[in-house]
Image (spheres, rainbow, N blue to C red):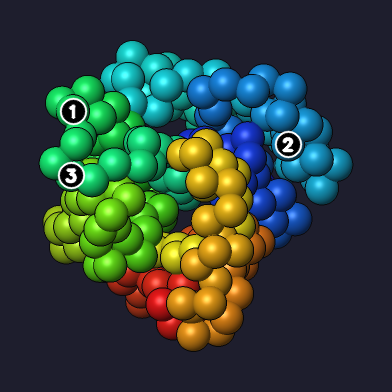
Amino acid sequence: MARRVMMITGGSRGIGAATAMLAAERGYDLLLTYRSETARAQATARDCESRGARVVLLQGDAGQQSDILAAFTRCDEAFGRIDVLVNNAGITGPKRLLADTTLADWVSVMTPNVIGVALHCREAVRRMSTKRGGQGGVIVNVSSRASEIGGAGEWVHYATSKGAVDTLTVGLSREVGGEGIRVNAVNPGLIDTEIHAAAGMPDRVARLSAGVPMARGGSAQEVAECILFLASDAASYVSGARLPVGGAR
């Protein structure tokens, strides 16, 4: 049987890389996009190839339409299909009180986290929709528990962007539910990845773990397992869900 094809944005590290490696093990070929750190992206691709996947690696900006279109064109050329889209790429922006944010802060966060996600979804739907000649498919958006918690004192701008992702997930799931496409989100909580250090808070997971009912941060692998579940036939009647992956926080 032909391997299914999964596109993962931000696939070089963290949740994206963990998802890619798990997907490779479970029978997917992959198109991985990344913005920087080419060496790490190449290492992730090699790891996935060692697990049996054919991998296409493409550098680009997940918030720029030209790069998004190039990624889907490359997927068309390399595989002739897309079965699963995982919208993982995004940024937190700097830690700031809302009163101290700038227009640039909002634009830099909203562009990849909301506009980029929406454009990726658009291109996936155009290819997957049974009403447009496609074979159906699955979209999994990586949102955040911040969409409900609110990000007060740190990332209200980021939390707002993830609230938009949740709304997009629900609305799109209803719009394309009759076209063979399922749309869901995972909402990670305090996950031990480099995103905290990138925002200037390398100790954030250790510092906030006491406030998690399960008394620890989560791992990228734990989030990846949830993404692969939502992508799988085991979740065939799950659409419009926003799955919390936050240790009850």
Residue 57 shows in this picture: yes
Three-letter code, disc 3:
Leu
Identify whether 10 is placed above or below 179: above
Rounded to the nearest angstrom, the CA distance separating label 3 from label 2 is 36 Å
Question: Which residue shows up at 80% across the image and 45% down it?
Answer: 52
Q: Nearer the viewer, mark 2 or mark 1?
A: 1
Residue 173 sits in quarter: bottom left
Residue 219, percent across and down? 63, 63
- Looking at this view, is 80 or 10 the one in front? 10
Secondary structure under tag 3 reads helix
Three-letter code, disc 1:
Thr
Q: Left or right: where does residue 41 sit relative to residue 134?
A: right
- Looking at this view, is 125 or 249 the one in front? 249
Residue 204, percent across and down? 53, 56
Q: Which residue is mark 1?
A: 102
Rounded to the nearest angstrom, the CA distance separating label 1 from label 3 is 9 Å
Q: Left or right: where does residue 162 sit relative to residue 10?
A: left
Three-letter code, disc 2:
Thr
Question: Which residue shows up at 33% across the image and 14% down it?
Answer: 66
Q: Of callouts 3 and 2, which one flags the residue occurring earlier in the amino acid sequence?
A: 2
> Which disc, if any, is residue 44?
2
Q: Nearer the viewer, mark 3 or mark 2?
A: 3
Q: Left or right: where does residue 126 sit relative to residue 227?
A: left
Residue 11 sits in quarter: top right
Q: Which residue is mark 3?
A: 98
Q: Left or right: where does residue 9 sit relative to residue 26?
A: left
Q: Of callouts 2 and 1, which one flags the residue occurring earlier in the amino acid sequence?
A: 2
Residue 144, percent across and down? 37, 59
Residue 39, percent across and down? 74, 22
